[in-house]
Amino acid sequence: MKPIHLKIDLNRSWLFDFATDVNRLAGTNIRISDNRFIFPPTIATGFAEVNEIETGLSFCTMELFLKQKLTIEYVKNERSPNCYFRYNTGSYNSEETVDEEHHFTKGSNLHALMIYKAATATGLSGDKGAYLNYMWVIMSEQWMQTNLGETPWLKDVPYIFHSIDMQLYATARQTGEIRSIAYDLRLVAYKGIILQLVSLSLSKIIQQQSDVERIDFADKEKIIYHINKVFADLSRPFPTVDKLAAGIFMSKSKFNALFKKIYQKNVYEYYTELRMQKAMALLRTGKYPVAEVAHRISYQNLGHFSRAFRKYYGMLPKDCIPKLSGIRWERNMQAF
């Protein structure tokens, strides 16, 4: 089937136009209900949703298991003063683009938070079988000044990436629990979580920028390139820190110090985070048994994997596998 390419302008009420385009391509007539559009099953299982919290602030979510290749291009809007905080909370086999850069993930996104302005061309894509799970907080410049104060460091930076951590992840996931409450209270709850999420994001970004500015650029690029290459395949055993440092002809102490400044965590914490995020993404596809997921992230002992997963997420791996499929799963998504 021919790949699907869609364009979105997040600076206005985009969901209606988006739903119209998807329905036209799929030959369906699925309506938007309660600000949510359920995808036609021939294209994807999942939904796209918009919540207008108040003037100048909106919150969008998208959660899709793709049935065919899909590319979503976010229209570049030079006239808009909006700023976007985009969070990847567990995508699988997705690709993010920003200007000329591409960031691909096989289960854990190395740059899970992206802040960018409306004048920056961005996009998402995934092949058949990919899982896209993204959230956007969209803020006008006036709303930011009123609620967050001045953010002069954003004015000269077209986009910023930052690795997500468990504090950000746990805060972002709270938004999924809000739909069950009354609509008026829902908007208040959304705003509370969004303020907490953005506050955490800004503090971590500012700290990271401050630390990274003191790192030699060549060393930073060397470490990032090396780490991305080594951890691209998580089925391989964890290399020792000595080997990682030796791979770029750097002392262990210098490597450890620079790594923590760049990633805000030590190597083992970072490696554990990658493994757990990939495990969650694989489990949520519903395609893999727990034993295979453990093997794919280099756990030889299923018990060790289950304990590590429970320590990280507070639940067992088996509890993350969808219990429904096909039409029943789609109905369950509608009631989400």
Image (spheres, rainbow, N blue to C red):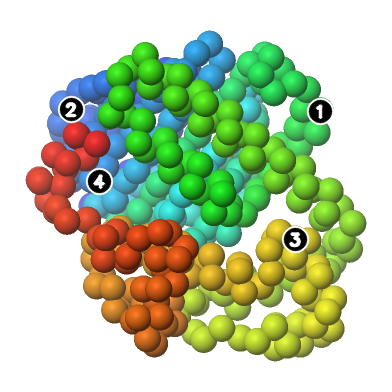
**Does label 1 or label 2 sit earlier along the sequence?**
2
For disc 1, the neighbor class at 10 Å (few under 14, some 14 to 19, many from 20) is few
Residue 259: x, y in percent? 75, 68
- Side of 156 relative to 62 (left or right): right
- Foreground mark, 1 or 2, reads 1
**Does label 3 or label 1 sit earlier along the sequence?**
1
Mark 3–mark 2 CB contact (< 8 Å): no
Residue with the most extreme top position: 55
At 75% from the left edge and 60% from the top edge, which residue is drawn? Answer: 262
Q: CA distance from mark 4 to mark 1?
A: 40 Å
For disc 2, the neighbor class at 10 Å (few under 14, some 14 to 19, many from 20) is some
**Does label 4 or label 1 sit earlier along the sequence?**
4
Q: Is residue 149 above or below residue 111?
A: above
At 70% from the left edge and 46% from the top edge, which residue is drawn? Answer: 204
Q: Which residue is mark 3?
A: 262
Residue 140: x, y in percent? 62, 18
Q: CA distance from mark 3 to mark 2?
A: 45 Å
Residue 36: x, y in percent? 29, 27
Q: Which residue is mark 4?
A: 44
Q: CA distance from mark 4 to mark 2?
A: 13 Å
The three-letter code of the residue at mark 2 reads Ile
For disc 4, the neighbor class at 10 Å (few under 14, some 14 to 19, many from 20) is many
The three-letter code of the residue at mark 1 reads Pro
**Does label 3 or label 2 sit earlier along the sequence?**
2
Q: CA distance from mark 3 to mark 1?
A: 22 Å
Pick the quarter of the image with the C terminus.
top left
Image-quadrant location for residue 115: top right
